[in-house]
Amino acid sequence: MGLVLNGPRVVLRPARTDDVDELLSILREPEVARRWGRFERTDVEDKFVGDAKVFVIDVDGDAVGAIQYDEEDDPMYRHASIDIFLTTSRHNQGIGSEAIRVLAKHLIADRGHHRLTIDPAADNHAAIRSYEKVGFRKVGVMRSYERGPDGMWHDGLLMEMLADELVQP
C-alpha cells in the first residue's frame, strides 16, 4: 500500500492506477497545464504511479492533485524539495497549504531534513502566498529558470524553510 500521511482535511497517499485518469484530467486544466506542461496517460502512469516520493492529495475520497518530493542525500547539502499541483476548483481553500504542511512535517520529523525548498514560477503569486503560510521564505529570483509549455524561458522563485520555521495551523 505504501506510506499514507494524514492532515485535518487531506490524506496524502500513494498514487494508484485508478487515479491516472483523474490526475490526467487535472493536469490538463488550463491553469495547471500552463505550469506543468502537456501530459499523456502514459506520462502520468510513469511519473506518478509506483513512486514512493509521490502522493495523491485526497480530500473526502477524491483525488484533487498530487504532491511530490526529492531529496539531496549528500551530507554537506542534505535537504528536500517539494512540488505540487492542485485542481483549480480547490484553489484558495487552504488545501495546498495543508498538503505542503503535512509533507513538510514528514520530511522533517521522519526523513530528518533540516531544510526544505520549493521553486514556484515567479509570477505564480497565489502559490507563493500559499507557501509563505506554511513558513517558506523567498530567497531570490532564478532568472530564465524553466522553459514553459509555451517554449519560452520563465523566472522561478527559490523559496526555503528551515525545520523550526514550519508554521503550525
Image (spheres, grey):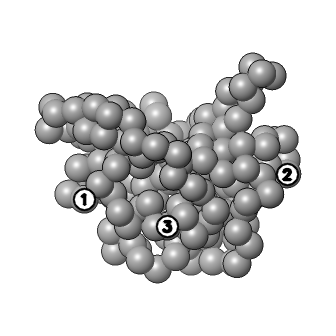
Instruction: Count residues near mark 3 (Cα–Cα under 10 Å), then give few for <14, some for 14-19, many for 20+.
Output: many
Of marks 2 and 3, which one's residue comes earlier in the chain? Answer: 2
Give the Cα separation between the discs numbered 3 and 1: 16 Å
Q: In this figure, which residue is indicated by the disc labeled 2? A: 109
Could you say where residue 111 lies in the image, as x and y percent from the top left?
81, 41
User: Element type at marker 3?
Assistant: helix
Residue 85's quadrant in the figure?
A: bottom left
Q: Considering only vertical position in the picture, is 4 above or below 145?
A: below
Q: Could you tell me the amino acid type at mark 3? A: Ser
On screen, residue 93 versus residue 122, left or right, reads right
Give the Cα separation between the discs numbered 1 and 2: 33 Å
Q: In this figure, which residue is indicated by the disc labeled 1? A: 31
Of marks 1 and 2, which one's residue comes earlier in the chain? Answer: 1
At a point 39% along the width and 42% down the height, the residue shown is: 141
Circles 1 and 2, Cβ within 8 Å, touching? The answer is no
Circles 3 and 1, Cβ within 8 Å, touching? The answer is no
For residue 57, say whether it is visible: no
For residue 119, say whether it is visible: yes
Of badges 3 and 1, nearer the viewer stands 3
Q: In this figure, which residue is indicated by the disc labeled 3? A: 130
At a point 49% along the width and 67% down the height, the residue shown is: 130
Could you say where residue 123 lies in the image, as x and y percent from the top left?
29, 54
On screen, residue 60 versus residue 144, left or right, reads right
Could you say where residue 14 lies in the image, as x and y percent from the top left?
62, 49
At a point 77% along the width and 21% down the height, the residue shown is: 76
Q: Considering only vertical position in the picture, is 109 above or below 94?
A: above
Give the Cα separation between the discs numbered 2 and 3: 21 Å
Q: Could you tell me the amino acid type at mark 2? A: Ala
Q: Viewer-proximal residue, 166 or 14?
A: 166
Q: Say how many tags the image has.
A: 3
Q: Work out which residue is located at the far front of the displayed protein and give it.
A: 140
